[in-house]
Image: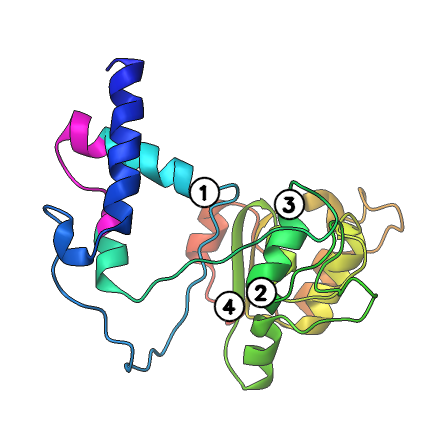
Amino acid sequence: MKRRDILKGSLAAGALALLPKGGAQGAPQNVPSLGRRYRNLIVFVYDGFSWEDYAIAQAYARRRLGRALALDRLLARYPNGLMNTYSLTSYVTESSAAGNAMSCGVKTVNGGLAVHADGTPLKPFFAAAKEMGKAVGLVTTTTVTHATPASFVVSNPDRNAEAQIAEQYLAFGAEVYLGGGDHFFNPERRQDKKDMYAAFAQAGYGVVKTPEELARSNASKL
């Protein structure tokens, strides 16, 4: 595909995104119900995703593959909207400020987790859900203590304090923590030599380190 065709397709896709649902050829016609109560909520964060990514993928799928994106069908089926995730202190946001915007509904400075610009702690909505008795879990392809997942459950002025965030996770008590970051839990790799694996196990968590161990686990918390 020529670069010119991709750019043309991107502009067309961007225009289609502004049309009513009935105006997008081939898009599902069902209208989302705003009054329905949902039992579960999954927050999927594609770090760095923007409408430019969506438009170029949409253009490629329609022009090259001759079909709509699965995301097109998802957006047509369920209520959706837009959110700004900018930082108060930088032209370019980063994981903590963007995560705070999503998890707390407040614009913050770069570098802190669920912390207002004046240092006041904020309450992420996963924490509010936990207080309501809901089960909460974090699953990530990065370190489990990374700023993006962490911003949804804990408050910390330093997103890079991942060893401390691991301890905050234990205190928070989510039902599931799955991700990388052995050096923040392993006593042989932590600077303070704390055995966070043992601490989580003592708190009733099943500690798994491989897909096979995960498949065999019957623990109520991971």
Sequence-first tag of 4 and 3:
3
Left or right: residue 23 versus residue 105 is: left
Task: Give me the residue at 45% from left, 47% from top.
Answer: 212
Sequence-first tag of 2 and 1:
1
In the image, farthest residue toward the right: 192
Secondary element under disc 1, as helix, strand or loop, is loop
| Amino acid identity at mark 4 | Ala
The residue singled out by tag 1 in the image is 50
Given contact means CB atoms under 8 Å apart, are the residues at marks 1 and 4 in contact? no
Secondary element under disc 2, as helix, strand or loop, is helix
Task: Give me the residue at 77% from left, 47% from top.
Answer: 160
The residue singled out by tag 3 in the image is 93
Where residue 188 appears, as percent x and y from the top left, is 81, 43
Q: Magenta stretch: residue 161 in it?
A: no
Segment colored magenta:
61-72
Quadrant housing the C terminus = bottom right
| Amino acid identity at mark 2 | Ser
**CA–CA distance between discs 1 and 4?**
37 Å
Left or right: residue 30 versus residue 161 is: left
The residue singled out by tag 2 in the image is 103
The residue singled out by tag 4 in the image is 219
Q: Magenta stretch: residue 67 in it?
A: yes
In the image, farthest residue toward the top: 2
- Please name which of the two marks, 3 or 2, marks the residue nearer to the observer: 3
Where residue 12 appears, as percent x and y from the top left, is 24, 35
Secondary element under disc 4, as helix, strand or loop, is loop
Sequence-first tag of 1 and 4:
1
Sequence-first tag of 3 and 2:
3
| Amino acid identity at mark 3 | Thr
